[in-house]
Image: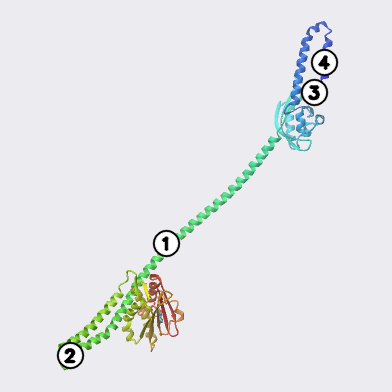
Amino acid sequence: MKTPSDSQNNWDSLREKIIGLGDHSLRKTYYPELQQKLDDLQQSEERFRATFNQAAVGIALAGLDGRWLQINRKLCDTVGYTEEELKNLTFQDITHPDDLKVSLEWFHRVLAGEIRNYSIEKRYIHKNGSTVWINLTVSLVSESSGNHKYLIAVIEDITERKRTEEALRDAYNELDKRVAERTAELVKTITALQEEVADRITAEQALQAEMRERMRTMEELRRKDQMLMQQSRQAAMGEMIGNIAHQWRQPLNTIGLYIQGLLVPGECGEFSKEHLEAGVNKAMQVIFHMSQTIDDFRNFFRPDKEMTLFRVDEVVAKTVSLVEGSYRCQQIKVEVKTKGEPLINGYPNEYSQVLLNILINARDAFLEKKIADARVELRVFTEKGKAVVTITDNAGGIPAGILDRIFDPYFTTKGPDKGTGVGLYMSKTIIEKNMNGRLTARNTGNGAEFRIEV
Ligand SMILES: Nc1ncnc2c1ncn2[C@@H]1O[C@H](COP(=O)(O)OP(=O)(O)OP(=O)(O)O)[C@@H](O)[C@H]1O
Ligand SMILES: [Mg+2]
């Protein structure tokens, strides 16, 4: 088979043979034309060779057994073998084992006449052992009789492109992986957030329910307090009526005596106008005092509307005067010791009510214990900027077991018709909630001591 690599010698001998023909005169006529055709052919052959050798892609002719017949420089560069080395090899020898099966399939399809050419991407093994990616285009060259002659292969080195593709694919995969990871993370975060939001909504609802419950409880407490306050006032009022009775007993006796005295003639044994006037004046003074008592009690029941600055000793003295009657009747001695003039900005009537509750409790305790030398001492003084009143009795004290319950609403040790158990509860509410102070109780050696600090 003649191939484009045939040397110049072939042309020269051909030329000599044609010139030899020139001896024959007939053929001489055609010689120049023949000569011209020969030149054209040679130039065409040279152009082809140049194209073949200097092509930027690998080009080769291969036999039907796969053996390399002719190889251009670029292909040699691509696979690292010299032309001679390659000619001793088949394309199968340098095909990557993983691509061999597919390569042979295509090759046989061409040889079988199924197709005339094909183009595939595959790998060669470079002489140095590295992998070379190529784009292979194969065409079959046949004789006019139909016999297959050889194959033309165009081999383009696409290693770089493949590498780029691979890097791109890796980058894409990496990106895909990261996106997947990030998505998973986001889904997790969103789920956690959703759960948190749900939790918060539940907590909020619970809080709202609790708030409503608290409001309800507070409202209930407020109503209860109002009720208690009312009860306490009513109890105090009943108490007061008793006290007025005590307060009035003596002045009434006195008035009785004065009126009887009017019937007794004067020192000179006569009923003079002066004698009558003196008796009426005395009686009127007592009546005025009694009327004063009524005013005092009435004022006591008038609730304070606004905070006022009041003198503690004055409220103490007034309150003591309210119980004096019943205290005297029970032979209870009251003593008030005042130091300075402590002032309080608050509600004087309510403060007085507290004192009264404590004083009445002391009286009840004396009554129950039947103490012979019953005495109550009130001390009024200032301590650490606070107005303090202590009320101390010697009625035996509060049993230790109930000391922490005496301020509870409805706690009483008295009979059902005697105590309601709201006195100290109300007193604590007045001092601590309304006036921001403190009301406490403790036992001294022989009695109870209540301490009011405002
Ligand atoms: N000075 C005291 N000595 C001993 N125990 C006392 C004294 N003061 C109060 N207590 C006890 O504290 C309890 C509660 O007192 P509180 O004034 O709240 O209710 P009460 O006096 O029983 O009833 P109310 O005052 O409503 O008529 C009394 O029942 C009593 O047992
Ligand atoms: Mg009481």
What whole-number distance in Å separates the C-alpha atoms at marks 1 and 4?
119 Å
Tell me which amino acid carries mark 2.
Leu
Identify the element where label 2 is drawn. helix
Work out which residue is located at the far front of the displayed protein and give it.
340
Q: Name the mark on residue 288.
A: none
Pointer 3 residue: 5
Mark 3 sits near ligand 1, with its Cβ under 8 Å away? no
Identify the element where label 4 is drawn. helix
First-in-chain label (1 vs 2): 1
Q: Neighbour class for label 4 at 10 Å: few (<14), some, many (≥20)?
A: few
Q: Work out whether 190 lies above or below 102.
A: below
Left or right of 170? Residue 45 is: right
Pointer 4 residue: 14
Quarter occupied by residue 343: bottom left
Q: Nearer the viewer, residue 147 or 155?
A: 155
Pointer 1 residue: 212
Q: Work out whether 146 lies above or below 227.
A: above
Q: Nearer the viewer, residue 232 or 341?
A: 341
Q: Work out whether 99 lies above or below 9.
A: below
For the residues bearing labels 1 and 2, Cβ distance under 8 angstroms: no
Is residue 203 in view from this perspective? yes
Left or right of 305? Residue 158 is: right
Tell me which amino acid carries mark 1.
Arg
Q: Nearer the viewer, residue 87 or 36?
A: 36
Left or right of 268? Residue 38 is: right
Is residue 231 in view from this perspective? no
Q: For the point 82% across and 18% down, which residue is it?
A: 10
Tell me which amino acid carries mark 4.
Leu
